[in-house]
Amino acid sequence: MLRSYFHRKPQSAAWRVRWMLAALALLIASIAFASETPQDLLAAGRVDQAVQDLNRQIEQSPSAESYNLLCRAEFELGAWDAGIPNCEKATELAPDNALYHLWLGRIYGEKADHAGLIHAVGLAKKVRAEFERAVAFDPNSCEVRTDLAEFYLEAPGIIGGGEDKALAQADKIESLNPAMADWVKARLAEKNKDRATAEREYRAAVIDSHGGAREWLNLAGFYSRKGRLDDMDRALRSLETSRSHHPAALADGASVILRTGRNYALGIRLLRRYLSTKTVEEAPAFKAHVMLGELFEREGNTSAAAAEYRTALSMAHNYTLAQDGLKRLAQ
C-alpha cells in the first residue's frame, strides 16, 4: 500500500498542475478576449463581433465614439446606408471632433460613388463640407488635409473642386508630411496627363519617405495605370522589401496584382506577410483573406482558396465576395 500510495502521488500532483495550467490559460484567454476593444476588433478584421459589441454599447450607454466606430465597421462592409446615420450621430454628439467629420465625409463619398448622378452631386457637396470641417477642427492633421486635397483633385468646380485648391492643400501638407505632398502633386500631374512630372513626383515621395512601402505602392499603381507592368513589378518587389512599414500597403499591393493579372506568387507573399503582422483597419483582414483566396483560385489551388473564403466569412458572415468565391468553387 505504501508503494502504491507513493506511486500515485506524483500522478495526482501532475494532474493538479495540468488542471491549474489549463485553468490559468483559459483565464488569461478570457481576460485578453474581454480586453479587446471595438477598435481592436476592427483592426483585426473581426467586423461581425465589432458590430455586435458596438450595438450593445450603444444600447447601454450611447456615445459619439461608439456611433463613429459602428459607422466605420459598416464602412468596411460596404453598408453605406446603414453607416451614414451612425456617422451623422457621432458628429451631432461631438461636433468639434475632426475625426468624426472625416469619417462622415468618407462614407458620404462611398455612397456617392454608388449613387445616381443627381443624388451623387448632393452627396459630393456633403463630402466637401465634412472634409473642410475636419480641416478646420484639426488643421495640423496630414490625414484630413490629404483627403480634402484628393476631393479637390477629383471633383468638378461646380461642386467645389479645383486644382488650385488641391495645390494649396499640398503646400500645407508639405510641412506635415513631404511625401504626401509629393503624392498630391503627382496625382495632379497624372490627371493633366503630364506623365514625366507625375513619375518624378511619385519617385520624390519614395525618396522623402526613405523608401516607404506606401510610396512604392503609389509608384507601382502609376506604372500599372500606364501599362508599364515590368516597372510595376519592380516597384512592388521594392514594396515587399521596404523597411518603412505601412501594413496596408502590403494588402493594396496584392490588389494591384489582382487587377493586372500577373505575378500571383508575389501577391500571395504580400498578403501572407500582411496577415502575419498586426493588421489594421485600413485594410480589413477579412478582405485580405478574400484577396488571398482569389489569388489561390487563379493559381488553381481551390482547397486553399476555399479555406481563405471561409476564414473571411468567419469574420464577416455576409461579405458577398467571400460568398461568391465559395459559390464559384462549388460549380
Image (cartoon, grey):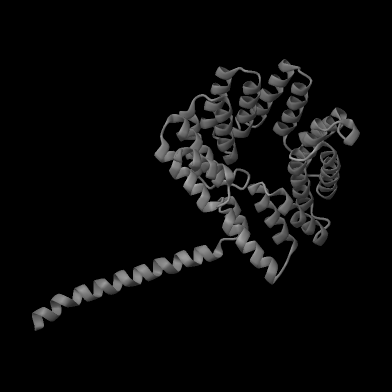
Q: Position of residue 166 (x, y in %)?
A: 82, 32
Query: Is 239 on the left or on the right of 93, as rendered?
Result: left
Residue 110 occupies quadrant: top right
* Farthest residue, direction front: 331
Q: Position of residue 331 (x, y in %)?
A: 46, 38
Residue 194 occupies quadrant: top right
Q: Residue at x 79, y 20 (%)?
A: 192
* Farthest residue, direction bottom: 1
Above or below for 66 versus 301: below
- Report the front residue among 155 and 243: 155
Q: Residue at x 52, y 50 (%)?
A: 313
Above or below for 43 versus 242: below
Above or below for 316 versus 59: above
Q: In the rendered image, is residue 180 in sight?
A: yes
For the N terminus, the image quarter is bottom left
Number of residue marks: 0
Q: In the rendered image, is residue 244 in sight?
A: no
Query: Is 239 on the left or on the right of 168, as rendered?
Result: left
- Report the front residue among 237 and 83: 83
Q: Position of residue 130 (x, y in %)?
A: 83, 47
- Report the front residue among 62 and 118: 118
Above or below for 41 versus 303: below
Q: Position of residue 276 (x, y in %)?
A: 47, 44
- Report the front residue among 180 and 273: 273
